[in-house]
Amino acid sequence: MKLIESTQNKTIRELTKLHKKKERDKTNLFLVEGQHLVHEAYEAGCLKEVFILQDEKLSLNVPLTYCTKPVLQKLSVQNSQAKIIGLCKKMEWTSHPIHRALFLDDVQDPGNVGTIIRTALAFGIEAVYCSSGCADIYNPKTIQSSQGALFHVPVIYTDLIFTIPNFKNNGMNIYATSLHSQSVPLDRVQVPESYGIVLGNEGQGVHPELIELCHQTIKIEMASFESLNVAIAGGILSYYFFIRQGDIKCNR
């Protein structure tokens, strides 16, 4: 049985560097915490190794290293007592036709990005396209918020100024979220077969140059208050577009 007892172990010191984006980008590796995320990573084929508390058990066909509590806490970025941490390689996605997409314009909070990815999976979004100003999807907070959805929904970092017109040219209708007076209320939007929704930065919204590229601006009407958290807005919009396409099947 392989056991690491020292927090100064060379392997552990190298792995803790993955808490930083620079090291994740350099190595194409990242860490996940908890049974659920470790199993999701395994099912996605990107789990390389597992570091687990001495007394815990795991029935996955991957290299296993047992650790003491202090060692796992060294690897952990969460406040809870870590019991299992997985070392993963970054996802690689094959290209395929996309008919439903979200475009994230500088969404900077990792929790928001993770929640949006989770929502995308729930409501049939086939890919999420992020500007370079968005939070890293392999940030521990993003991973935790996604609850494993990042292993199932392609997330691509790109220049939206060029990506959005490419989708438009292929027949996708693009909608930008905006609160200005000319925006169409959500319940009046005619949902097409192929659509993209642009969600903006937490403070500034969607950049004007991206709004100009879209077919229509839309807004969520509210009883009071002037705006919603971007992840909440993304959830409402994704759900509305989903049900208006008749994608929900009721089993009675």
Image (tube, grey):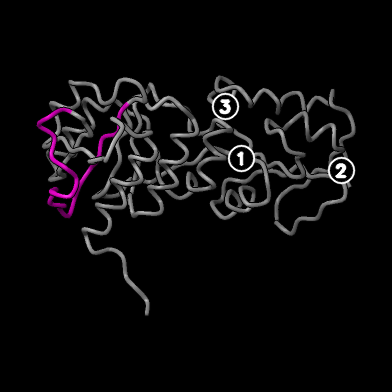
Amino acid found under the numbered disc labelled 3? Arg
Residue at 68% over, 51% down: 35
Is residue 85 located in the magenta-colored stretch of the structure?
no
**Which comes before the other along the chain, label 2 or label 3?**
2
**Residue in view at x 45 percent, y 41 percent:** 115
Q: Which residue is mark 2?
A: 2
Q: How crowded is the residue under tag 2: few (<14 C-alpha within 10 Å), some, or many (20+)?
A: few
Q: Residues within 10 Å of mark 1 (few under 14, many from 20)?
A: many
Is the residue 108 above or below the residue 189 in the image?
above
Q: SS at mark 1? A: strand
Magenta-drawn segment: 180-200
Q: Residue at x 60, y 34 (%)?
A: 30
Report the disc number at residue 88.
1
> Are dots 2 and 1 in contact, CB under 8 Å?
no
The residue beneath circle 3 is 24
Disc 2 residue type (three-letter): Lys
Q: Position of residue 133 (x, y in %)?
A: 38, 21
Q: Nearer the viewer, residue 92 or 121?
A: 121
Q: Amino acid at mark 1?
A: Cys
Residue 194, percent from left and from top: 19, 50
SS at mark 3? Answer: helix
Q: Which circle's residue, 1 or 3, is located before the other in the chain?
A: 3
Asked if residue 203 is positioned above or below residue 91 in the image, the reply reads: above
Furthest residue to the front?
224
* Real-space Cα separation, disc 2 to disc 3, in angstroms: 25 Å
As drawn, the residue found furthest toward the bottom would be 252
Left or right side of 138 for 176 = left
Residue 245 or residue 66, whichever sits in front:
245
